[in-house]
Image (cartoon, helix red, strand yellow):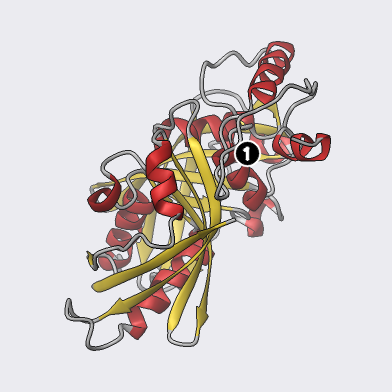
């Protein structure tokens, strides 16, 4: 591996040890041991001692890159409540909108690269990974990070007020209630705590094999693939471009349990969707199968968008 390549893999580390790492063919990469060793030194220096997967991992690095996590930030986790309404005057609860938002977070999680910019300005990053209906409100579990310590303190202040905002995806007006942070916002570099939260919720395992690339998929109205699902394909694209998508168990019908997927961009190309992905697995053979252009994927049903999907081969780069 060249020095430049190693620097790209290990961009999170403060001290780079020029040791070889295992690189596989067909666009597959293993965990970089030099990056891991350097991360441990960095965490000792910053008094962040959690024993978890490293952001040097290519999967987490992809998330960091797409989210544009700050080099130096302040991070907090906790819970908060929100209520959705059908109109801006908050006279009627939007039962469907609240249910759809909860279902989407529980299924795909949610990564927000610019959370509540109307309150905090640009650049606050949010990871929402669980939602539960409690009475007539939704309860959300979050990890949020920002380069601004004052913004994070404002987020965790129970006196902070949030104006009602409109959510076009679910046709719902939302009232956010105060955010309850488990601890004071913690100082950390390169989003370590934020990525630790993602790693924990995704149940990532150390030493996996990872690939990035693009692939195409077509959505249909019925299992016999006789009619294209225009609305389902549009909704899936919009959701990924707005919230990105984290799959803790991608295509178990083909690969068995445990393959992890991060889908972060989607565009409509003629009558088909094109997706950008990073996928990781503890099984190198499964990753080679994913990147094999001869691998075929049975049509599967997506209840969220009422669409039958035909995945075409994955092009790993």
Secondary structure of the residue carrying numbered label 1: strand
The location of residue 70, given as percent across then percent down, is 73, 41
Which residue is found at the position 31% from the left and 63% from the top? 296
Figure quadrant of the C terminus: bottom right
Q: Is residue 77 above or below residue 43?
A: below
The location of residue 136, given as percent across then percent down, is 26, 53
Q: Which residue is mark 1?
A: 145
Does residue 171 appear in this view?
no
The location of residue 141, given as percent across then percent down, is 41, 39
The answer to which of 25 and 150 lies nearer the viewer is 25
How many marks can you see?
A: 1
Q: Is residue 303 above or below residue 145?
A: below
The location of residue 114, given as percent across then percent down, is 63, 55
Left or right placement of residue 157 versus residue 217 in this view: right
- State which quadrant residue 72 falls in: top right
The answer to which of 93 and 292 lies nearer the viewer is 292
The answer to which of 81 and 193 lies nearer the viewer is 193
Q: Is residue 20 above or below residue 294?
A: above
- State which quadrant residue 201 falls in: top left
Which residue is found at the position 70% from the left and 51% from the top? 123
- Mark 1 burial class by Cα count in 10 Å: few <14, some 14-19, many 20+: many
Which residue is found at the position 78% from the left and 23% from the top? 18
Figure quadrant of the N terminus: top right
Does residue 298 appear in this view?
yes
């Amino acid at each position: 591996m060249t020095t430049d390549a190693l620097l790209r893999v290990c961009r999170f580390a403060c001290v780079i040890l020029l040791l070889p790492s295992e690189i596989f063919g067909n666009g597959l990469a293993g965990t970089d041991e030099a990056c891991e060793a350097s991360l441990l030194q960095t965490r000792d220096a910053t008094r962040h001692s959690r024993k978890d997967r490293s952001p040097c991992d290519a999967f987490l690095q992809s998330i960091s890159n797409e989210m544009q996590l700050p080099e130096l930030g302040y991070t907090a986790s906790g819970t908060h409540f929100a209520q959705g309404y059908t109109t801006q005057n908050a006279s009627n609860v939007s039962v469907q909108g609240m249910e759809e938002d909860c279902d989407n977070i529980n299924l795909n999680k949610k990564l927000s690269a610019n959370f509540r910019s109307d309150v905090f300005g640009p650049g606050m990053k949010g990871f929402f990974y669980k939602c539960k209906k409690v009475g007539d409100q939704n309860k959300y579990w979050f990890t949020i990070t920002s380069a601004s310590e004052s913004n994070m303190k404002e987020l965790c202040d129970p006196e902070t007020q949030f104006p009602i905002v409109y959510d076009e995806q679910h046709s719902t007006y939302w009232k956010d209630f105060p955010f309850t942070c488990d601890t004071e916002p913690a100082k950390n570099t390169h989003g370590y705590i934020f990525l630790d939260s993602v790693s924990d919720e995704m149940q990532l395992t150390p030493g996996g094999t990872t690939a990035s690339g693009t692939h195409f998929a077509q959505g249909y109205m019925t299992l016999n693939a006789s009619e294209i699902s225009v609305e389902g394909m549009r909704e899936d694209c919009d959701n990924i471009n707005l919230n990105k998508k984290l799959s803790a168990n991608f295509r178990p019908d083909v690969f068995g349990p445990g393959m992890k997927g991060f889908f972060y961009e989607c565009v409509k190309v003629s009558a088909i969707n094109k997706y950008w992905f990073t996928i990781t697995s503890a099984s190198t053979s499964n990753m080679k199968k994913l990147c094999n252009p001869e691998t075929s994927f049975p049509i599967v049903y997506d209840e969220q968008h009422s669409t039958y999907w035909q995945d075409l081969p994955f092009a790993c780069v």
